[in-house]
Image (spheres, rainbow, N blue to C red):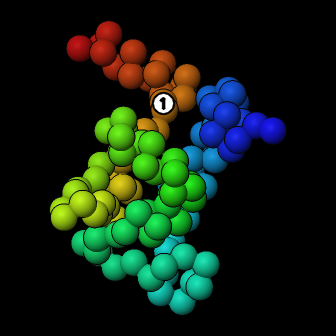
Amino acid sequence: MATEEQILFSLPLSRMEPIFKGWIRDVLNTTVGNTNTPAITKDQFLTIKEAATLLKLAVPTIYSMVSRRAIPYMKRSQRLYFSRDELTKWLIDGKRSTIEEIKVDALKSLER
């Protein structure tokens, strides 16, 4: 049986973009009244379980990403911590440009 990661990374980029946008929207819309995700305030440090919930990933996936240094984290006293703001920025920085955006950027660079 294929894991969520295997399924996700076998999708073409055009199908992945709405998934990532949904994750980012969920992160930005996290509220205190929502019982499905932990209440997160600005500048709060998250545990690995909270980070996994925020990113909608499994805890072992987060550990794997940490070991590859593929995700921003902090380590203190053998515990991992994650900044909500850094995780949100990390998600947004991973956005892939659409073909239209690439064309516009290319035309802008030719005009200079």
Q: In the rendered image, is residue 4 in sight?
A: yes
The picture places residue 29, in percent across and down from the top left corner, at 51, 71
Give the SS element for disc 1.
Answer: loop
Q: In the rendered image, is residue 83 in sight?
A: no
Q: Residue at x 55, y 23 (%)?
A: 99
Q: Quick check: 35 above or below 101?
A: below
The picture places residue 91, in percent across and down from the top left corner, at 42, 48
Pick the quarter of the image with the N terminus. top right
Q: Quick check: 24 above or below 109?
A: below
For disc 1, the neighbor class at 10 Å (few under 14, some 14 to 19, many from 20) is: few
The picture places residue 8, in percent across and down from the top left corner, at 66, 37
Report the residue that reaches farthest toward the right: 1
Residue nearer the viewer, 108 or 64: 64
Residue nearer the viewer, 58 or 13: 58
In the picture, measured across the screen, residue 57 lies left or right of residue 76, that is: right
Report the residue that reaches farthest toward the front: 78
Pick the quarter of the image with the C terminus. top left
Residue at image mark 1: 97
Q: Quick check: 50 above or below 63?
A: below
- Identify which amino acid the numbered label 1 is placed on: Ser
Report the residue that reaches farthest toward the top: 110
Q: Residue at x 49, y 74 (%)?
A: 30
Q: Residue at x 70, y 41 (%)?
A: 3
Q: Residue at x 59, y 85 (%)?
A: 35
The picture places residue 38, in percent across and down from the top left corner, at 48, 79
Q: How many marks?
A: 1
In the picture, measured across the screen, residue 75 lies left or right of residue 70, that is: left
Q: Quick check: 102 above or below 93?
A: above
